């Protein structure tokens, strides 16, 4: 159990209000037709499943219903950083 | 170490002031083995046992970062069944069930396998249609299964609530009579002891920190107790499979989630069978010790923390209480979590990889315990022959590329 600071509601809320929405920065391929089966499988099914500080997507289901980014430790569940999609992308995420 | 347990060895050790021998010797790693198994849980130990027993490969090390029985093998809710929907899955789980049926004798260790039956409840018309379909598929595959209605459930389990005035009334169930439970950590100890009797080294407190790969071939592993060489390495590290895969530069189609369970204080016998419900999301049995063993679902977020959210426990407790209102005053003793590696199709990966000599047995998700002997058996043959065992063929990792997924969410879903 942990709390997450919603970047839209601008306050910490209980984790129960949010739903996880998977690993962050997995962009839909721009031209799926051009992908090999391996690349498509990697996009759809394969995941980094990082043990450590993990960038992931969450949605504030019982609040503003907006999606945003959370950097969270998968070892301690500590939320390290939250951001909107405008603020951070795979290029400048640390 | 006692080679064989019998009434005579019991009497002898009993008379000798209960001077019991250690069941599993503690081994230090040698510098080279034919096969290294990463992960000393039930599946890893079973793999080592069948490598030695059926494949003639005894120069095997099982490398475990913790202690035997301390991981998911000792954390699950011990349910064993084989009533899966798809041919591929039910064949694999039924193979395992048949091994369970002779396991205590085979291992010379009482794993307390108890075929007390499992009810999978249905609460809606669609549940019942799915149950009938699954039962018919089971019967065609030679797996025992019947559909029972709510009256028969009430006859068999008088304390269950079959009232129509609840949110999700019980309409019926599938019942597998040969299903049941076993003593989970005993299974690990039994396999460990039997494997080490055949010459396998069980190395505890030894964490793998890197995998040596040269020109696409596995060479061995680096551990906290030094380097160990081997031409073949089998990874059976459940929740940490992605971490091990990363050491070899691989990615896996799995994600790790916490799965929780809890047990009550010990009570007199009140529930003689296993009751599971996917719809309301809980499963319960009573252990031989007398405590209720209750399993919940996974948290949706990734985690390696071996603990989950309170809301999952609350949700599960609410479901169990709707099924069994009589349990409302039962006090819970302990609650814990384990880390499970979940595949997108709720089926495992038992497969070679792009790296020659490196094999993975992972992705069992929330239901690996029931498969322990079967999983080890087919994985041992897969490693020994460098060719997948017939039953393992559908579980190749390439199915995520070819699209030949085995969708077991209906039979596996949340409650295993």
Image (cartoon, coloured by chain):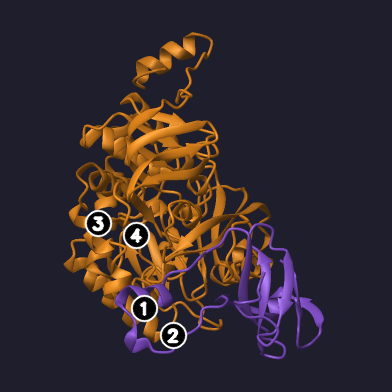
Q: Residue at point 30% right, 72% down?
A: B401
Q: Are marks 2 and 1 on the same chain?
A: yes
Observer-side mark, 4 or 1, equals 1
Residue on which the image places disc 3: B392
Q: Is mark 1 in CB contact (under 8 Å) with mark 3? A: no
Identify the mark at residue A29; answer none if there is no mark: 2
Residue on which the image places disc 4: B349
**SS of the residue under disc 4:** strand
Badge 3: few (under 14), some or many (20 or more) residues near its Cα, within 10 Å? Answer: many
Q: Are marks 3 and 2 on the same chain?
A: no
State how far apart marks 4 and 1 are (Cα).
19 Å
Image-quadrant location for residue B319: bottom right
Residue on which the image places disc 1: A40
Residue B304 % position (x, y): 59, 57
Badge 2: few (under 14), some or many (20 or more) residues near its Cα, within 10 Å? Answer: few
Using residue B313 as the reference point, say whether residue B287 is left or right of it: left
The orange chain is: B
Q: Is mark 2 in CB contact (under 8 Å) with mark 1? A: yes
């Amino acid at each position: 159990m942990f709390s997450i600071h919603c970047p839209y509601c601008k306050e910490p809320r209980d984790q129960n209000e949010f739903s996880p929405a998977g690993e962050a920065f997995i962009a839909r391929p721009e031209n799926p037709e051009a992908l090999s089966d391996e690349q498509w499988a990697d996009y759809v099914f394969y995941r980094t499943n990082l043990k450590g500080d993990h960038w992931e997507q969450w949605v504030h289901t019982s609040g503003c219903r907006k999606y945003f980014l959370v950097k969270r430790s998968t070892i301690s569940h500590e939320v390290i950083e939250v951001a909107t999609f405008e603020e951070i992308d795979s290029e400048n995420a640390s | 170490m006692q080679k064989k347990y019998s009434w005579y060895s019991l009497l002898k050790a009993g008379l000798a002031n209960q001077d019991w021998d250690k069941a599993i010797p503690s081994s230090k790693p040698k510098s080279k083995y034919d096969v290294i198994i990463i992960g000393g849980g039930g599946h890893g130990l079973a793999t080592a046992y069948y490598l030695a027993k059926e494949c003639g490969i005894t120069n095997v090390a099982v490398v475990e970062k913790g202690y035997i029985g301390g991981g998911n093998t000792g954390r699950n809710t011990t349910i064993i069944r084989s009533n899966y929907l798809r041919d591929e899955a039910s064949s694999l789980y039924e193979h395992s069930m048949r091994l369970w049926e002779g396991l205590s004798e085979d291992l010379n260790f009482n794993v307390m396998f108890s075929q007390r039956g499992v009810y999978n409840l249905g609460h809606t018309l669609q549940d019942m249609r799915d149950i009938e379909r699954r039962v018919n598929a089971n019967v065609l595959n030679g797996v025992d299964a019947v559909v029972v209605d709510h009256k028969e459930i009430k006859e068999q389990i008088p304390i269950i609530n079959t009232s129509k005035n609840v949110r999700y009334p019980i309409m019926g169930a599938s019942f597998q009579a040969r299903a049941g439970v076993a003593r989970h950590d005993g299974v690990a100890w039994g396999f460990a002891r039997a494997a080490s009797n055949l010459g396998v080294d069980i190395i505890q407190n030894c964490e793998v920190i890197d995998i040596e790969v040269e020109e696409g071939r596995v060479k061995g592993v680096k551990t906290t107790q030094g380097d160990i060489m081997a031409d073949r390495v089998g990874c059976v590290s459940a929740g940490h499979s992605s971490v091990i895969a990363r050491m070899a530069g691989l990615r896996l189609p799995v994600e790790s989630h916490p799965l929780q369970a809890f047990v009550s204080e010990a009570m007199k016998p009140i529930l003689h069978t296993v009751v599971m419900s996917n719809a309301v999301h809980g499963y319960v049995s009573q252990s031989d010790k007398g405590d209720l063993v209750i399993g919940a679902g996974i948290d949706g977020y990734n985690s390696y923390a071996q603990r989950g959210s309170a809301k999952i426990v609350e949700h599960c407790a609410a479901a169990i209480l709707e099924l069994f209102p009589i349990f409302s005053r039962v006090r819970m003793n302990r609650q814990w979590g384990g880390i499970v590696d979940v595949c997108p199709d709720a089926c495992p990966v038992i497969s070679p990889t792009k790296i020659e000599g490196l094999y993975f047995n992972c992705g069992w998700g929330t239901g690996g315990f029931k498969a322990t002997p079967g999983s080890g058996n087919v994985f041992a043959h897969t490693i020994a022959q460098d060719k997948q065992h017939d039953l393992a063929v559908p579980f190749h990792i390439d199915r995520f590329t070819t699209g030949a997924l085995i969708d077991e969410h209906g039979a596996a879903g949340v409650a295993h």
